[in-house]
Amino acid sequence: MLAGILFLALAVLVQPGDAAEKKDVPEHYEPTWESLEKHPVPDWFHNAKFGIFIHWGVYSVPGWAPLGEYAEWYPRRMYQEGNPTYKYHKEKYGDPHEFTYNDFIPMFKAEKWDPDRWADLFEKAGARYVVPTGEHHDGFPLWDSDLTEFDAADMGPKRDLIGELAVACRKRGMKYAPSYHRMMNYYDPPYDNGAFANPHYESSGPDKTFVKNWKKRWEELRDKYRPDIIWFDGDWMAPVETWGTKEIMADYYNIAKHKWDKEVVVNDRMGKVRGKRGDFYTQEYEHGLRSPDIIPQKWESCRGIGQSFGYNRQEDADDYLSAGELVDMLVDIVSKNGNLLLDVGPKANGVIPEMQREGLIGMGEWLDVNGPAIYGTRPWEVFKEDDNTRFTRKDNLVYAICLEWPGKELKLTSFAEGSELCPQEIDHIRMLGVAGTVEWSRDKNALTIQVPDEKPCEHAYSFEIHLKE
């Protein structure tokens, strides 16, 4: 995956008019932006707020990258002389033209993988949707493909990893969408014995044969697993016209509506339109703190718990975000109209590292108490009052979420009497995780909330402000 677009730049791209309410939803979508942009973002995606990304594949066998780089790019970098990955591979496995990337495939066994155990963890973490990498830039599908035997069902694990996980996640009520990153595969030159690479590579860009095969594989993934999201990647090298992605979007919308009878959503990685087209915009490893304000267009931030999406054996506890840091990131992103797609990088045997599990479990424990301030909410009039407080809203409720313990009193000037932000009267206030209501007073300077003595949870703390209707 490409390093994220700086979110400040993304914020500039999105103007308030871009997110105007979409009306006149067509009965049948056409492959034009005029038609496609009438597609509404479904409520389930707005409401979900938190999803799990999974980068797992043959690259998980070496599981190595310089700290701060993506380990899932191993199959490309192992062939690039002068690259640290090339040096590592040569020292550990030998010349990459003799011990090739394909030689890792028999070592990708997933022998300890239990899809139900994964799904239980994701559910416990509070995730509402799951996005495993169906096929990453190495060209090795994790599903049972009828188009190639170079897949996880015929080689390595000899299991339909995507299909088995789909069953486990969906029976727990989570949405499911294997991602598809094959666009970038065209740009892998034909390294000796590197079967994942494109033998027809030309620097001028993808030819019709590659695009045709790319589309067929996507259609197989679509029809076999009915993904709730199109989550494409590898988009930054060629325009949508090369890939025919407007046609793909129209077909997807129409099939979902008329054949599957479900609401779906599409990201912005359809070609060179990131931050400009799609139901939701994406960025990675540049989370919402980069944004100076609420982003009207629905968006999603993705990143790993550590510094890499794929498993990197070099990372230790200092390289992973703590549960508290993950919670603060989720709260900030949601306050600005975003979702968090948090990635785990399992080992080749199918085990999610304990440090990653700890972060997910901590998130789930926090959401068990504070979920009402996150799920189903929308941005309030402003996303924050100071560096410590974030706001969300739901009907006549406004949530003030303090990233740090506020002490004995919480003063909110945004809710002062006569404030343009909150002209309504306040009925009562409660703190999530605490029985009953809390005492409060309001004057022309501020709303002052009396904070209970005991903390109801670790990390951030949510106050539910009930406005009179």
Image (cartoon, rainbow, N blue to C red):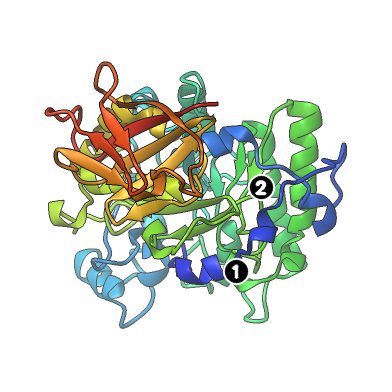
Q: Is residue 43 left or right of residue 449?
A: right
Q: Quadrant of residue 449?
A: top left
Locate residue 134, reporting x and y percent: 52, 44
Locate residue 373, reporting x and y percent: 40, 33
- Tell me which residue sits at (23%, 66%) in the image: 67
Q: Point out the image quarter for the C terminus.
A: top right
Q: Is residue 332 left or right of residue 295?
A: left
Q: In the rendering, which numbered label is found on residue 233?
A: none
- Tell me which residue sits at (14%, 51%) in the image: 317
Q: Is residue 374 left or right of residue 82?
A: right
Residue 318 seen by the camera: yes
Q: Quadrant of residue 307?
A: bottom left
Q: Which residue is mark 2?
A: 218
Q: At label 2, which amino acid type do we have? A: Trp
Q: Residues within 10 Å of mark 2 (few under 14, many from 20)?
A: many
- Tell me which residue sits at (38%, 52%) in the image: 384
Q: At label 1, which amino acid type do we have? A: Leu
Distance Cα–Cα, label 1 vs label 2: 29 Å
Locate residue 374, reporting x and y percent: 42, 35
Of residue 90 and residue 85, the one placed in the foreground of this image is 85
Residue 52 seen by the camera: no
Q: Which residue is mark 1?
A: 13
Of residue 306 and residue 324, the one placed in the foreground of this image is 324
User: The residue tagged with tag 2: helix, strand or loop?
Assistant: helix
- Tell me which residue sits at (25%, 75%) in the image: 87
